Image (spheres, grey):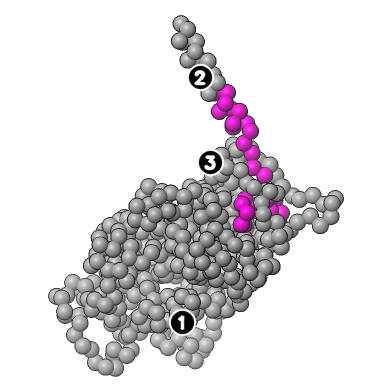
Amino acid sequence: MRHAKQALLILSMVILSVAGANAATSITIGKGDFYISIGDYDYLPYGNQDRLPRVNFYEMMSDYGTWVSISQFGRAWRPYVYYDWQPYTHGHWTYTQYGPTWTGYEPWAWVAYHYGNWIWTQRHGWLWLPGYDWHPGRVIWSNSYNTIGWMPAPPRGYNYFCGYLCPERYTYGGGYNDPVYGRRTSDDSYKFEDYNDYDEYSEYEDYDDYGDYGESGEYEDSDRYGNNRYPGGNDPFYSSGFRYDPFFYSQAYLRIAPRLWVFIPVNYFSYDNYSDVYFDTDFVRYLFDRRLIQINRQGLDRVGLEQIVRQRVSEQPVLVKQMQTERQMVRVVVPVNEEEKIRTHANRVVKDVIAPAFVEKRKAFKGAKARNREVVTRVFKQPTEAKEQAQVETLNDQTVLSDAKKAREERRMKRQQVRTRGIETIEKADKEGKLEPMKRAREKAEKKEKAPKGASSQKQPEDKVKKRTVPQEGQTKVDSAAKF
């Protein structure tokens, strides 16, 4: 009897402590242009300083997530984010002198999208591996009919050939030079020239149909095809390096590909925020099942980007700053005039994506105790007079979680509509024969892949070699500029 009473007393204390913890949990979130700091480093490069304060990446990112150990990589960072989050979705691409450059709306976006690499793991989901060389956005570009996509590129020497990340010694062909497929670019059987017999792309003017996604009206025909703007004539892949690759459809990779890729309709490329308009995993799987994916391993310059999205892409100026990290001095590149877009979307990302994860982890925002007051004041609206009150709301944990669940469902419904329209567009194009050039290119590539070894390495006429050669890695303007 006595033991039963003791057990009941312990159980009661546990229930009361849990209930008390739940009741005590709340998060204060800014409304409109008012912002409540999450950590000490929110949007740090957008301050006025030419030289940023010293930052330790490991300490900094601990404000926004946790560090885990990965046997192949060592320490990797896992962000506190809600369940449907994935990299390179809450933000947009702009074009700078370094190529397509990502502006993210998470408070830590300026670090995690411009240094190091993102990888997806079965156990932890998306993880960030630290790096110290700035890049505009380390992704691999792809496209399909009326669609452009990107995938976070894993570190060199690792790929997803196993349906997960494989170290170099396990990659297909043992390759180190290709971070996705593990193919040695010095191996003749895998050179791009093998897949560049695109004579039949002369019929590719059908690709210019806008389908159900509207008409941009950005170009006049004479400008698009009459002034040597596109050296490949009607072939939108001529200079942009997009090619069909049979290895892209290996069974192991197909199992994981829908988790990795982000695709949007091309007319949404100029949107400020892709979080509501990117295709869901079902559509990505649909594109792979139909074998309608073209990959670009060379980097995407402005001409190639304009060919794909069919609109003018202006180059945005940047500010270049320096920052000392725990390891070395690094370059920080900030596209100018992005503050307004950050103000518009930051609080939504914080409320819908970051706050619920903090609630579940029992973590608190640093708020007024954060050390980034100068940056927050510069980027976000702050009270200018004592009588003016910041617009904030304090939410308990249940409200935060229920609001996040509702917002997640709204995003899912919007993306479902985008998926439905995308499938309808492709099905319509297929019935009208507009996918035939892509199918023929696929058939040629697969035929050459199955050809006896050495058959594809025969020399071709000199004039055709010049026509078909795709610049190798490091030769494009984007690659060379982004490597500093």
Q: Earlier in the sequence, mark 3 or mark 1?
A: 3
Q: Earlier in the sequence, mark 3 or mark 2?
A: 2
Crowdedness of circle 3 by 10 Å Cα count: few (<14), some, many (20+)?
A: few
| Residue identified by numbered label 1 | 477
Looking at the rendered structure, which numbered label has been put on residue 361?
Answer: 3
Q: Which residues are magenta?
A: 15-42
| Residue identified by numbered label 2 | 11
Residue visible at 57% across and 26% down in the picture:
17
Give the percent coordinates (x, y) of residue 482.
48, 75
Amino acid under disc 1: Lys
Crowdedness of circle 1 by 10 Å Cα count: few (<14), some, many (20+)?
A: some
Looking at the rendered structure, which numbered label has been put on residue 245?
Answer: none
How far separated are the C-alphas under marks 3 and 2?
23 Å
335 over 35 or under it: above or below: below
Residue contact at pointers 2 and 1, CB within 8 angstroms: no
Q: Is residue 264 visible?
A: no
Give the percent coordinates (x, y) of residue 165.
33, 57
Amino acid under disc 3: Lys
| Relative depth, front residue between 329 and 236 | 329
